[in-house]
Image (tube, helix red, strand yellow):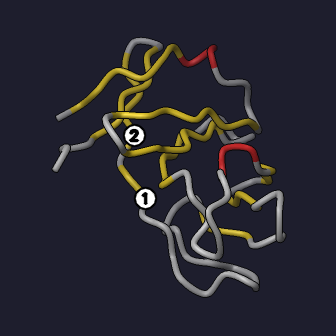
Amino acid sequence: MAIRICNVTDIKPGRALRVKIGDHAFAIVHSPDGSFHALDDKCSHGEISLSEGFVDNETIECWAHGAKFSLETGSPLSLPAYEPVNVYEVLVENGEVFLEYEAE
């Protein structure tokens, strides 16, 4: 199911937005190249919000310990993280951002 998150202009390129659906928190990321991504808003190394981190090209870096994750795959690209984070499909239609998510 596609859930409307926001307008494209609500998230500046190179920034992330924390969105909570039920008990699940997501980081919706607007990459500098204009693409949008969604991943769990929790670093796999610790209970740190990734949406407060640093976006650089196709990565997001945890602000607390510096672990970087691929926005495409959720794979950790640097220590101290060694576990991936979940990624989710994002759709952009008519200037609006939608998250493909089925609540459990």
Q: Position of residue 56 (x, y in %)?
A: 80, 53
Is residue 103 left or right of 19 when viewed as pictured? left
Task: Tell me where residue 60 sits by quadrant.
Answer: bottom right
Q: Position of residue 19 (x, y in %)?
A: 49, 32
Q: Return the residue nearer the eye: 12 or 82.
A: 82
Q: Position of residue 11 (x, y in %)?
A: 65, 24
Element assignment for label 2: strand
Q: Is residue 7 above or below residue 76?
A: above
Is residue 59 left or right of 28 when viewed as pictured? right
Q: Residue at x 40, y 12 (%)?
A: 94
Task: Tell me where residue 101 sits by quadrant.
Answer: top left
Q: Return the residue nearer the eye: 45 or 29.
A: 45
Q: Residue at x 24, y 31 (%)?
A: 2
How many other residues sit within 10 Å of disc 2, few (<14), some (14-19) or many (≥20)? many
Type of amino acid under label 2: Val
Residue hosting label 1: 87
Q: How many marks?
A: 2
Q: Is residue 7 above or below residue 51?
A: above
Q: Position of residue 100 (x, y in %)?
A: 28, 40
Residue hosting label 2: 90
Q: Is residue 81 above or below residue 26?
A: below
